[in-house]
Amino acid sequence: MTTFTHFREKIRNFFALDIAGGIVLAVSALLAMIVANSGLADWYQHLLHLPIVVQVGNFEIAHSAVHWINDGLMVIFFFLVGLELKREVLIGELSDVKKIVLPALGAVGGMLVPALIYAVFNHQNPDLLKGWAIPSATDIAFALGVLTLLGKRVPLALKVFLASIAIFDDIGAILVIALFYSHGLSWTALGVVAVTMLVLYAMNRMNVTRTTAYALVGVIMWVAMLKSGIHATLAGVIGAMFIPLTNDKDPNHSPLETLEHDLHETVSFVVLPIFAFANAGITFSSGGLMSQLAHSVPLGIALGLVFGKPIGVMLFSWLGVKLGLAKLPENVDWRQVLGVAMLCGIGFTMSLFIGGLAFAGLETKVFDERLGIVLGSLIAGILGYAYLNKVLPKVENNEFEASKDHTYIP
């Protein structure tokens, strides 16, 4: 085997790892911080604010590069989230009502308590209070990636439990974005969105399976959503709901699962790393890290992720079991649930996304919410890993073999 062939094989093996996407995402975020605090800082800011205009006649869409990434490129990520949600509800873990009660309750608690902690620190300022939803998110890519590091010691049911909580978190985040971070509604644009939804519905009922046809209508929906006042990325979630799960002409082919599989690498190794590089460029001022973190916004976010998430997930899960509404999964005990609850404090991607929406209207900021997101997520990940490494069985057992489940994690 030649050196080049050996190197190529190593690269292929790396990208096949469950944690590869998380590693690439973390490296992209770290690179953004390095560039933002180096001699390339001006170049970095110029690149992010580079104006990009798409115009057809009198109709134009003009945004900076970072807005094109957040409002355009991230549609692919949300589309993949939508595909995952639909598949899980129809044939996956969320299709069994008995199995969804516990993670649903955990997710609700994991959203409410961090939001409450953040509000305690920022209730005095209405502008700052807009960031209440930032620590409520869970990054399924990083959380499951950390869990994967523990190998076969992780019970299958525990991995499914974490994935289910993260999925419900995504549903909550989507609703939060739609209800609280949309403004200046255009009913004309919303009318166009409604028409595209009817077209997609008709295509689904007619068993249209060509994804390019759905993509063309989806682009029109995205443009209309962009002009409607509702965040454009929600077009991705809505569009995914109309992709057929089955194919009447070929029962062995699932358009939804095929498309989901095809998009994994694009989202994992292109979309999310670009998003992280564009949004994680925290500038550390001469005042020092601790003085920046002491501001109520990053402090509230960090504490919400590190403490609010595990408290909320554990409290609501425990209440659900005690009230007889749910029961613990097989081979899972409360110590392991606590470890998963800690990992739920890894907010990163969705937290960065919501943070950008929450404070988009502020003309001047004396804080950087991204500092609380990155630091809180990092601490939550380290604590969750260390705790689970201590409480999980030391001897590997085939009974605990991790599943090769279909998730949209990088």
Image (cartoon, rainbow, N blue to C red):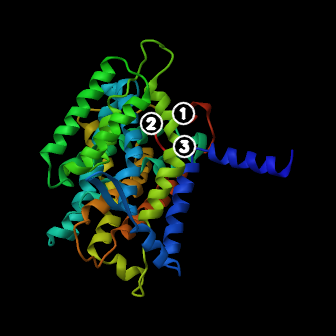
Residue carrying label 2: 160
**Residue that label 1 marks:** 403
Q: Which mark is residue 307?
A: none
Assign a secondary structure to mark 1: loop
Residue 68 screen position, x and y as percent: 37, 57
- Between marks 3 and 1, how big is the CA–CA gap? 19 Å
| In contact (CB < 8 Å): disc 2 and disc 1 | yes
Q: Which mark is residue 265?
A: 3
Is residue 184 in view from this perspective? yes
The residue under the point 29% across, 44% down is 234
User: Which amino acid is tagged 3?
Assistant: Glu
Closer to the chain start, of discs 3 and 2, is: 2
Q: Secondary structure at mark 3?
A: helix
- Residue 324 visible in the current orientation: no
User: How far is the residue under mark 2 from the one under mark 1?
Assistant: 8 Å
Report the side of 124 relative to 141 (left or right).
Answer: left
Is disc 3 surrounded by few (<14), some (14 to 19) or many (20+) residues within 10 Å? some
Q: Which mark lies nearer to you, 3 or 1? A: 3
Q: CA distance from mark 3 to mark 2?
A: 21 Å
**Residue 372 lies in quadrant:** bottom left
Q: Given this view, does label 3 or label 2 mark the residue nearer the observer?
A: 3
What's the residue at 41%, 44% (across, down)? 76
Cβ atoms at labels 3 and 2 below 8 Å apart = no
Other residues around mark 2 within 10 Å, as few (<14) / some (14–19) / many (≥20): some
Res 242 quadrant in image: top left
Looking at the picture, which amino acid does disc 1 mark?
Ser
Total number of numbered discs in the rendering:
3
Where is residue 319, by image quadrant?
top left
- The residue depicted at 14 percent of the width and 72 percent of the height is 124
Q: Amino acid at mark 2?
A: Val
Marked residue nearer the N-terminal end (3 or 1): 3
Q: Residue at point 51% right, 47% down? A: 268
